[in-house]
Image: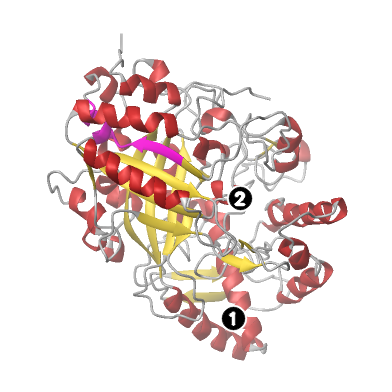
Amino acid sequence: MNAMDLRDIQGNIVRAYGRYGFPHARYFLFHIATPSAGRRFIADLLPKVTTSERWRDNPDGDTVSVIDRPKVTLNVSLSWKGLQALDLPTQTLTRFPREFIDGMAARALILSDLGPSSHSNWDKVWRDPADGVRGTETHVLVNLNAQMREDGTPVPELDEMTDWLRNLGATRHITLLTGHNRDGGDYQQAGAHLVEGLDGKLRVDNKEHFGFVDGIGNPVFEGQYPDKVEDQRTPGRGKIMPDQSWKPIATGEFLLGHADESQELPHVPEPPLFTRNGTFLCFRKLHENPGMFRKYMRDQAETYAHLFDVAENEADITMRAKMVGRWPNGVPLMVAPTYAEMLKFDHDWADIPDIRAKTGHRTPAEQTRLDAYKQLLIDFKYRDDQQGVKCPISAHIRRGNMRDMLDPMMTSKNPKDWTGSALTNRRRILRRGLPYGAFDFDNDDDSTERGVIFIAMCADIQRQFEFVQQQWINFGMDFNAGNDTCPLLGYHQTPSKFMVQADPDSGQSPWMMTNLPQFVETRGGDYFFVPSLNTLNMMAHGLVDPT
């Protein structure tokens, strides 16, 4: 196990707060007018920053922790312009990566923020800085994540912390930026989908607005969990070794100052301690068009059902699953490739919904059963589906995490030749966002404010986040798919298509979806640096010395 100083690492790096009982979030953007005001602001935030220290009541198997779970977590990150506004030394500022210095708005061509996703369609709070409006630059991002009350609403401490942030900004002469959503609010809200359990209490359902279970496959890295929990969670989430076993990903892929998968320490600004135990955060507001998605899938299903002589309901859900790579309930196509197999899988695991709905104590047998089910959702490889017969080559989850698809010896029959997922391991990202907007799966009005706050964390923005976004989501050569983009998240130009491969032995023809609409649109975002607690302290006291 790679020991980490959890007291020095911000908590949103190690934890995806949603699964720890924090289904509500608010994101605040601040502008720093003067370096002295900015330093005082950081100093005031510092005592409230949530670290990665493990909590007393947690699902991570750590029984020695004495830290209580907070009602509201607080985490802070800064853009490059925010670091500049603190008057950091030039030697420090200029040695940050080029993409971080540029900021997200300047990387539009790389990220395919074009057409409906262009800056002219972003929320005002993100659009004004992109257009160069003075005094609107996003310098500081503050994330609040909150527990909920029995009725599903946030605990009152969330409003208290919100008021505290507003007052702090005003007294420190720090501008709380407005212009989120169409109503121009001073923060971006987000919140998980909640459903009622058997005892009448609400619980997190993990669905996004297209109706799919989301957030299943976050990576596991060395030192993230205690040893016993790490062993349990690594299969399907870590890296595939040549012998096909699973190991945690190197810590340095997600935390600066630690060795990465190449066994190297990345180039960092001076002094090296400034970035140690920090990471980069890629914030993107992604608007979803569920009405457009449902209409398109219904039209596809009608034709598919007629040609292949199946019921339209079966055709509809099958086409959705082929596009995403999972059935709406989260079951991967690699586990249940066909509609009939999906129904059988649901029958075999018919007790899972009731076990999940128990928001209170589960018996050991129930927990073991639920753990086994969850493992099936994540522990799979693509070696036995090289032609995409089970899960289409270009399906969304296959593009987002290629697992063993890039093994150069994938076609070898000799297991001694296999190399695992070495070429994929350096492209992984941590996801830490939540959906935003009210959940109404019968609402087809795509002008409704709803989507996903997508937060990716990684040690190298270009090598990890931007590479996945540019090469895997919005290009197809690594999949032998030409210029085809991700059918769900990709930028869809006319003509666009998505190929559903067919089993050569079935006698059936492949199915091609054409003229894909733009299901997802970018509405704002930027790149931020997430400092360690030690670095926040250095900045608050003006003690950043590159020599």
- Comparing 494 with 9, the one in front is 9
Residue marked by disc 1: 316
The tag on residue 19 is 2
- The CA distance from mark 1 to mark 2 is 30 Å
Q: Quadrant of residue 103?
A: top left
Q: Secondary structure at mark 1?
A: helix
> In the image, 322: left or right of 61?
left
Relative horizontal placement of residue 534, taking residue 252 as reference (left or right): left
- Amino acid type of the residue that numbered disc 2 sits on in the rendered structure: Arg
Quarter assignment of residue 291: bottom left
Q: Identify the residue shown where x is 31% and y is 15%.
A: 543
| Residue 280 in view | yes
Disc 2 element? helix
Look at 65% across and 86% down and name the residue there. Answer: 308
Is the residue 545 above or below the residue 403 in the image? Answer: above
Which image quarter holds the C terminus?
Answer: top left
Nearer to me, 411 or 5: 5
Residue depicted at 48% across the width and 25% down the height: 277
Percent x, y of residue 179? 24, 57
Do residues under tags 1 and 2 come within 8 Å of each other at their CB atoms?
Answer: no
Could you tell me residue 8's position as x and y percent?
50, 24
The colour scheme used to paint the residues is secondary structure
Residue sitting farthest toward the top: 547
When the figure is inspected, residue 372 is found, relative to residue 89, above or below; the finding is below
Residue 238: % across, % down: 65, 40
Q: Which residues are magenta?
A: 74-86
